[in-house]
Image (cartoon, rainbow, N blue to C red):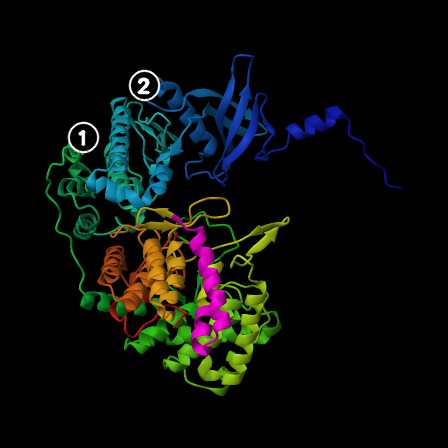
Amino acid sequence: MKVETIKTVSQSVTEETEVKGKAVKKAGKRIGYNYIIVKSLKESQKNDVVKCFYIKSLTNFGFCVIKEGTYGDTKDKHGRDIKDRLIWQQQLHAELQDKVRIPRLLGHFEENGNYYLVIESIKGKPFFKACREKNGELRDGLITGTRTGITFINYLIQIIDLLNTLHKHHVVHRDATSNNFIIMPNGKVAVIDMELSYSLLQQAPSPPFQLGTFGFMSPEQLRTETPTIKEDVFSAGALLLQVWTGISPTKLIDVSLEALVEKVHFFIPDKTIARIVVQCLHPDAPKRPGLSTIYNELVQYKGDLRQKQQRSITNPVVFTKDQINQTIQQAIETIGSPLLADPQKGWFAESNKTEPLNDKRKINKVWYTSFSKGATGVMYLLNRAKKTGFDTQASDLPVQKALDLINTKYIQRIDDASPSLHFGATGIAAVLANAINDGLIEAQTIYFEWINQLLDRDNQNAGFMNGIAGQGIAHLLCSDFLPAELIKERLDRYVAFLLKNQLNDGSWIYKEIEDKVKKRQGFATGASGIIYFLLEYALRYQNKEVQASAEAGLQWLMKRAVYRGNKIQWRSDKNKELMHWWSEGTSGIALAFIKAYSCSDNLTDKQRYKQFATGALLNHPKQVVDNNLSQLQGLSGLGEVYLEACRVFQEQEWNERAAWIAQVIMHLKKEHHEFGPYWMVQYEHQPTPDFMTGNSGVIHFLLRYCYPDKIGFPLLS
């Protein structure tokens, strides 16, 4: 007979308090005696950070930040864990809180084997976030002295002053990144995250806690040498570079001093500021300037901007098309190298599903097949490269591995295959058709059969990236491999579906959530991609009804537009301004209007479509700079739209804008000592070869920039 054990209240409480490990970070749950969780700010293996509300008495209450350290977690080689770091941080806050603008120490306690540091919650936003919010206008503002530019120079002056004050009290911060300074509502700047700091007076902690943030760590900090104030000077230089460019320092500074000078002089046109940044980032610590020198130069720069004083400018390196062509060939060889392709499995990608690795220089590798993040996207680049005369032999083995993946993951499981253009079967079919036409793979009957099988998939989604609009485009790209009547039959079915599901206002439903209709305007999953396909169909088959449907969609987009001077923007269902990239942003919407312009023979309509396309593309400054280089939502995708605008409108401005992006990408090129050039495209820890978010998409843009008459828009021509 089974005996049931009944716990008393006292037993339950005792056992609960003995549970080791991290506390559950759920709003409303209590930590300690006085603290109620409001929200989680950060969760990681190293430590968690939560915002809490504390009540200690009728007059002593408010918001605070609590850092949790679990005993034994992430021990270093000296046996110290996160608890040791938090105890050290507690000592620093107690010592410095009346001397430097840092969060005040409110307390500390232990519970369930965890250590908790309680500090003041400073109102404001991280400096990194403030920079990102102004990214489209910040660099231009810093160069020309707009109100935004002057505001951010003031922030930088305060940051340098804060670091200098720490040094006067014999403390080196050692993690002076843009995330570790808070911009308060009154415009003041506070410094946070002191756990890696080092006391020069106490020579503690001994040894210093290791590492910090890649891109902001000096060479000597990476070597874990005894800290000096010059570590913070290096970080200050990285911070200045990030603010001026909007680009992660990791993409710029891991190069020779000569190459660093080239990059800095390209991105920072003011000669004095560029010189200071290079000096700060000098690998030899004694050759870095003092913080007072940086402070004085920033104050002088601000004064000169306000008084419109002429200042000396840099003479940046400009790459010729011959040099870009040479880089393209070398990068194509890198695509086939072990840096981006496993010798046994072929091209890899970063997993969408697994947690990131603790080692920030590695990724969880997976082997996808699809166009967007898989092997066939890389094949697509090689198709285009081979067509323009580049040597693609270095990738012969990975191409074969890609064909094997198509067979095992799609053909042998065809009933379960997704119909998505970017993440499924129809995009793979389009790539195979291009590969045969461009001579990348040999024409074989089996591949013709594969193309038909991959295209013939049921789909109930309307959009371009995953839906029927994209499936229709795939059929048009495969027209050499299917009977014309079969293609027409399927396209008619797709068009009928889209017309049936078009709403009276000209839009389409993206999805419904709890009886709420969600609509999107962008190209990847919204109305613009659908309109593009309908325009292409109407043009090919001279169908007035479909043309009218596309025009109704364009009218809906025009009614939703918001005018900002000569710029035209759109807003989401939540009334947030759309981004300005290809996938769901204004440049993708511009692509639909460019297509409408090219398809129309009505001069009035053409002028109106051109106005909307141009207004959408003017949201970016002429010299746009961004950390994201991808096709999906970065500079390569924007550059492709510029090239399309140049081709259709025959206006040189758009080619000049694309040329600037090509220069930015060339200056962000990294060089592997064995395998050749590559790019860190987004925020990945290791380069990947995929098309929409990796190296293949970047190379495709450079290829199209050099050969605009031979290479068209990806997966549209």
Dot 1 crowding, Cα within 10 Å, few <14, some 14–19, many 20+: some
Question: Could you say whether the residue bearing mark 2 is in a helix, strand or loop?
Answer: loop
Q: Is residue 339 visible?
A: no
- Please name the residue shown 69% across and 26% down the image: 14
Asked if 544 appears above or below 184 in the picture, the reply is below
- Please name the residue shown 19% across and 51% down the image: 266
Q: Is residue 153 magenta?
A: no
Left/right of residue 104 with respect to residue 135 in the rendered view: right
Q: Main secondary structure of the magenta part?
A: helix
- Please name the residue shown 28% across and 23% down the image: 201
Q: Position of residue 385 (x, y in %)?
A: 32, 73
Q: Nearer the viewer, residue 715 or 221?
A: 715
Residue type for callout 1: Val
Q: Is residue 540 magenta?
A: yes
Residue type for callout 2: Lys
Task: Mark 2 and mark 1 in contact? Answer it, CB < 8 Å.
Answer: no
Please state, as top left, top right, bottom left or bottom right, where the N terminus lies in the image: top right
Left/right of residue 704 with respect to residue 300 in the rendered view: right
> Magenta span covers which residues?
534-562
Q: Is residue 234 visible?
A: yes
Q: Which residue is mark 1?
A: 299
Residue 595 quadrant: bottom left
Residue 17 quadrant: top right
Q: Which residue is mark 2?
A: 99
- Please name the residue shown 51% across and 50% down the image: 355
Q: Position of residue 504 (x, y in %)?
A: 55, 58
Asked if 293 appears above or below 54 in the picture, the reply is below
C-alpha gap between disc 2 and disc 1: 23 Å
- Depth-wise, is mark 2 or mark 1 nearer the camera? 1
